[in-house]
Image: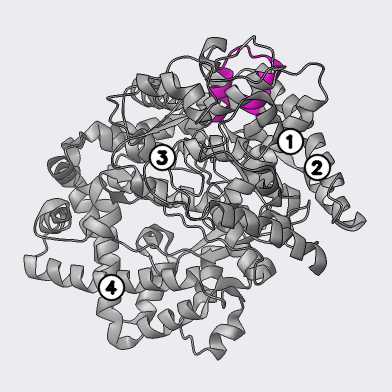
Amino acid sequence: MFIYWGDNHMKKENSKSTRYRLASAALAFCVITQAVGCGSKEGVTLDEVQQDTAITPALSANDLGVSEMSVAEKIRDNGQPILDYDEFVNGEWKKSQEGNDRKITAIYNETYLEMQDYINDLIQNTDPDSLSEDDGLYKILTIYHQLSDISDTTERIESMKAYLGKIENVKTLDDLYDLYRDDRYEIVNNILIYTPVPDDGCYIDLCWDPRNLWSGDNYPSKEGDGIIFYKVMEDLGYTEERAEQIANNAIVISDMILECKKQMDTSETFRRRDRKSFEEAGVRVPVFDILGDQYADFCPDGFDPRIDMIYASEEYITLLNTLYQPENIEMLKDFCIAGAVRYLGMVADSDRYIEIYGDTADQIALKIVKYYAEELLMQEYAEHYLDTATIHDHKAVTEEIKQSMRSIIDDAAWLSTHAKEQARSKALRVREFYGGDTAVNDFSDLILTDNTFDNYISLSVNCSRFYKSQITLVGEDRSIFDSDDYDINAWYYPGYNAILYSAPWLKFYQDAGSLSEEEKLGFIGSAIAHELGHAYDTFGIEYTSKGVYDPWLSEEEYAVYSENVQRIEEFLDGRETEIGTTIDGEQVLDETIADLLSVECCLRILAEKENPDYDAFFRSYAYRYAKVYTEGAGDIVNEDTHLTGKNRINLILGQFDEFYATYDIDENSPYYIEEDSRLSVF
């Protein structure tokens, strides 16, 4: 887990690629490693919320627009057919957001901001002396207070100079490999970096996960934000000429890594590879020996058979063979120096970051400890805010959703008995985790000193070792780790067949208060069913109920499934969003599959109830997914794998007969869908 600075925020790198059937188990692995906290993600992001003041009204029956009107006569909009259901339900709420400068506003912003306030208050105002020195929170708060006090800047600079000394002493490739073996220097090893992730066979495996040092506006420059690199180098005693040489060398390698990562997104050679395959490809870098040393404490019998093979592509092998040549040693060393400045400069030379970015020392310290101690801090948040009734409600609704999903599967005439058993088993056996990661670093092994810089390095090493420790876990003993616990999110993990609900997600629904059964189903049930729906999207469909990549549809069944999802993609592709962009059908396909299954699940549950209030269900669903977009949201929308708010409401609800039986939808509306054009997954 590493931190890097960009646009004055700390971020994690994530990516996701999509297509129907995966070419191989290796590609399936690649997908699931990215799906942890991404593809099946529901909720708000840091970019959406920024640091704005909450203005979202509390949820109530009135907010949901629940009507006492009988649906025996179709509901209309002031006596007229409904042209835009999203506007019909959420129009007044959207007007209340006018003047808001967020790029995207959703109804859960208030919960997010409340959570951030609580975490900030916990860090800033908890007295470390009130805690045991062995307590993980005590250690995190101690580091926070050290980072906040920049009176020791001179000592920090000198500590970093000493740290850089080992890099400067690198003369040969063997020296460089020894540096890579030292876990204190893992933070600057941006090429031979491998991340523990769940694989496609109930193990934790290793995947190449390099970080390019710079992108966009963050490249070193003599003006703008990029000047931070040269300012820190100056304070570390480097001449301008040497700093420029280091920057140029590092940029060359960083761009090579970035290009390799782009190629890997579409590579058909990404698979498990062992030592022999590396040797046959002419790789002289002792990758497996270095990994063996890095994991020696967790695999004492040697490089564990489970990780004797690592996932890599031919593009990566070419990168290794190109870079790791004796004539490139100075360039490789400079890349490590630049990495140290990139990732450690904010600690050693906080004054410069305050000068360039405008943050205070306290803000820098907050960002650092919130990044590294995310799971621990959110555990404190969950214990403070969440009540057992909220989790009980989630579990009860989840059981209904599971049964409903199984009925959808039972009614799929094109599925064989074997396929139905496999699909039903996924719904029956799906595991649920409430409140955040199931593996939480308690920092019990973290040893602190009086040196701020050394403590930061120790914190980074401790977190890295915590993730490495997951490598020995197998099957259902594996823990979920490194999800984005601060997000108001839920995730489905195909490799675990599990759903994880973050603590802010649960708090968001807890804040909804008392809801009718129909409101609860539209507001909570639809979101739960959405996550379960990912078990049957184009990735999830390939995994068993135990989380093993083992495609269970026959060729004939897969042909029907592919035809169904192809119709979904074609239906969406090219349609316009409310901000004038067009939908990429392939990009939003899997999230749309989950949305369609979600609403179908909920409607089947409603059909079993006596006199169900469909109006209340549809309104609460629409309110749940309401969003307001302002100028500048285009980039976020174009990268999102979900439909925009209006399309997620109108185009999804418009696929179901019950929706048209409840409302008089204008047949001239762009959101009206003819009965024979309506979509279905199964």
Badge 4 density bin: few <14, some 14–19, many ≥20, Cα 10 Å = many
Q: Which mark is residue 408?
A: 2
Q: Distance between the Cα atoms at labels 4 and 3? A: 49 Å
Q: Earlier in the sequence, mark 4 or mark 2?
A: 4
Is residue 49 depicted above or below 155 in this figure? above
Badge 3 density bin: few <14, some 14–19, many ≥20, Cα 10 Å = few
Q: Earlier in the sequence, mark 4 or mark 1?
A: 4
Q: Nearer the viewer, mark 4 or mark 1?
A: 1
Report which residue position mark 1 lands on.
601
Q: Which residues are magenta?
A: 505-524
Q: Is residue 517 magenta?
A: yes
Q: Earlier in the sequence, mark 1 or mark 3?
A: 3
Question: Which residue shows up at 49% across the image and 41% down it?
Answer: 484
> Foreground residue, 214 or 288?
214
Report which residue position mark 3 lands on.
578
Q: Distance between the Cα atoms at labels 2 and 1? A: 7 Å
Q: Distance between the Cα atoms at labels 4 and 2? A: 58 Å
Q: Which amino acid, mark 3? A: Glu
Q: Which mark is residue 321?
A: none
Q: Nearer the viewer, mark 2 or mark 3?
A: 3
Report which residue position mark 4 lands on.
333
For the residue labelled by badge 4, is the local secondary structure a helix, a strand or a loop? Answer: helix
Q: Earlier in the sequence, mark 2 or mark 1?
A: 2
Is residue 676 depicted above or below 44 in this figure? below
> Foreground residue, 140 or 547?
547
Q: Which amino acid, mark 2? A: Ile
Image location (x, y in percent) of residue 281: 53, 88
Image location (x, y in percent) of residue 618: 62, 25
